[in-house]
Amino acid sequence: MSPTQTKDNCKRELQVEVPAEVVARETDTLMQRYQKLARLPGFRRGRVPPGLIRQRFAEDIKTDIVENLVPRYFREEAEKQGLHPVSQPRITDLHIQEGEPLRFKASFEILPEIEVSGYKELRVEKPDTTVSEQEVEDALKNLREQHASFTPVEGRALADGDFAQVSFNGVPKEPGSKPVHVDEVMVEIAGSNTMPEFTQNLRGLSSGDERTFDVTYPQEFSEERLAGKTFTYTVKVHGIKQKHLPELNDEFAKQVGEFASLEELRKQRASEPRP
């Protein structure tokens, strides 16, 4: 039977009929099951007459028939009509009488039909993913930084380019801000990422020295909890170190990957498309 389309374009109704012989077979199967399990006074288990079973459990058997047959025949009818329900059906107009077909109406929702047009004319501009020579050099520079080594410096004070091995406590001057505590960190004197106040106050100190000073962070500082705030830091120098970058040669290429030469490493970096 063809589905009925309601006013809502997403709703459908189906009239479904289960053949009388199917209902009869299901009834017989259920009768046998109830007969095996029923316990009635005066009868041994499994010996209750069918007529008494039918009389005593008539409503239970009808309920089981509906629960067993309605979902199955609804799915079969929906598939036959090429419908794909996205909601549980609402069953109405249920008719079930002995010797007659089981009839019911099922109301349910389907996905709306969406017409997509114009997409064939769309064109996507592919970004340029070619890697420049400068980008290759930058990648190799980053690799060298990742494999840098640090050696201790003895007998002199901190100078530009050195790395101070320090611990510090920072107390905020603004109420409500949390203090800062770091057990060990490397601070590059005059480094591009080093706050000027650290460079100015640590330059000239030696291992074991301690100094207290204020640092005011700009409003656009990358770390939100520090941005726009002033902290009083007490910094202790535990050591002075110098950074050494590995030489850019074939030996370096072998260390950072399975490359036979520096040239092979360069080619590999050049072949990686830009994100």
Image: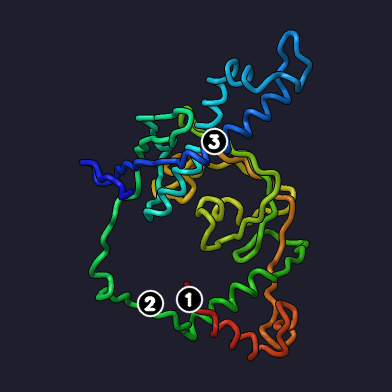
Q: Residue under circle 3?
A: 24
Secondary structure of the residue carrying tag 1 is: loop
On screen, residue 167 above or below 42: below
Q: Which circle, 3 or 1, is nearer the viewer?
A: 3
Find the distance from the CA under tag 3 to the CA under tag 1. 71 Å
Q: x, y (%) of residue 107?
A: 34, 38
Whether residues under marks 2 and 1 lie with C-beta atoms below 8 angstroms apart, the answer is yes
In front of the other: 121 or 147: 121
Dot 2 alpha-carbon crowd within 10 angstroms: few under 14, some 14 to 19, many 20 or more: few
Q: Which circle, 2 or 1, is nearer the viewer?
A: 2
Q: Is residue 84 left or right of residue 179?
A: left
The label shown at residue 127 is: 2
Secondary structure of the residue carrying tag 3 is: helix
Q: Earlier in the sequence, mark 2 or mark 3?
A: 3
Residue lying at 63% horizontally and 34% vertically, measured from the top left: 29
Three-letter code, disc 1: Arg
Find the distance from the CA under tag 2 to the CA under tag 3. 69 Å
Dot 3 alpha-carbon crowd within 10 angstroms: few under 14, some 14 to 19, many 20 or more: some
Residue lying at 44% horizontally and 43% vertically, measured from the top left: 74
Q: Is residue 117 left or right of residue 54?
A: left
Q: x, y (%) of residue 122?
A: 27, 73
Q: x, y (%) of residue 201?
A: 57, 50
Q: Earlier in the sequence, mark 3 or mark 1?
A: 3
Q: x, y (%) of residue 268?
A: 60, 84
Three-letter code, disc 2: Pro
Q: Residue under circle 1?
A: 274
Three-letter code, disc 3: Ala
